[in-house]
Amino acid sequence: MSGTAPLSLSVVLPAFNEEVLLAGTVRSLAGTLAALGVSHEIILVDDGSRDRTGAIADELARTLPALSVCHQENQGLGGALRTGIARARGQYVLTWPADVPVERDDLAPFVDRLGAADVLVGVRSRRAGYNPLMQLNSWIYPRLVALLFGLRLRDVNWIHLYRTDYIRRVTLTQRGIPMLVEALVRLRDLGATFLEVPSEMKARTAGVASASRLRIMGRTLRGLIQFWWQWRRDRPAR
């Protein structure tokens, strides 16, 4: 990849306390992107981790030229994604979880459709590793989003790819998981085009997903309602 050639893809990887899984995810991501032949960079945002995530990220950056690392105080998923998007040099920005290793079939649906729409929305056919409460929550959440915002997508909290110049035109305010919905709603209101693509989910092999905690579920619901109220208030301006 030439230092002066334009990049096609910036992959933003938010990481919080992922010392066990991080190295495997980053190495598999870098190898798969290279195999697919897409010009790319990987932006790893260490979101105030309290374990060795930051140190592991720095070690990886010394051996992977396409990887850059940003350390910041904990700002939640939304804050980490905003940081990564602000630093992106690619024409498109792809979000990827730090606990999900990557194979060719995981990335190909997005890479093969670069340019097909302003926003590519990954759709899971199942929620691997989800307990019954998480399964129920994942069934309710997109329906609640459709009711509140009129945004009818089958999956709103998974892998997203944005055209960089579009995502930078919207103001994102949410710190946590609701930022993903906020981005989609604001891009829809801006006139962006959407395309849903298949994107399967792997179960975690270590650690506990933060979304499984009741307090995170409650915080996500509060954030979604807070954004809905703000969005309603701003409607005359739109």
Image: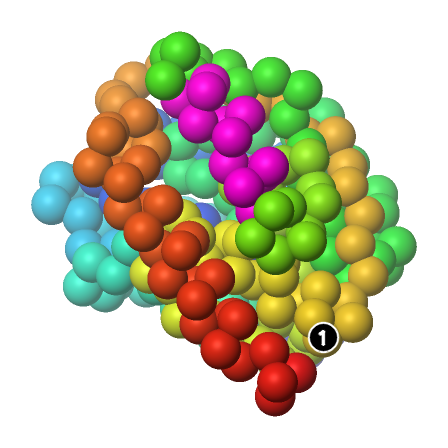
Whether residue 133 is visible, yes or no, is yes
Magenta residues? 134-145
Q: Examine the structure image and report whether residue 152 is included in the region drawn in magenta.
A: no
Q: In what quadrant of the picture does the C terminus appear?
A: bottom right
State whether residue 36 is above or below residue 192: above
| Residue at 36% in and 17% down | 133
Amino acid type, callout 1? Leu
**Which image quarter holds the N terminus?**
bottom right
Instruction: Say if 96 sits above or below 131 in the image.
Output: below
In the rendered image, the vertical position of residue 236 relative to residue 3, given as above or below? below
Q: Residue furthest right?
A: 116
* Relative side of 233 to 153, left or right: left
- Residue 141, how many percent across, how many down? 51, 36
Give the crowd class for mark 1: few <14, some 14-19, many >=20 residues within 10 Å: some
Give the percent coordinates (x, y) of residue 12: 49, 55
Instruction: Find the residue positioned furthest to the left.
Output: 50
- The percent position of residue 206, horizontal first and vertical second, equals 29, 18
The residue lying toward the viewer, choosing from 67 and 202, is 202
Image check: 130 left or right of 212? right
Q: Nearer the viewer, residue 202 or 58?
A: 202
**Outermost residue, bottom side:** 237
**Which residue bears the numbered disc 1?**
190
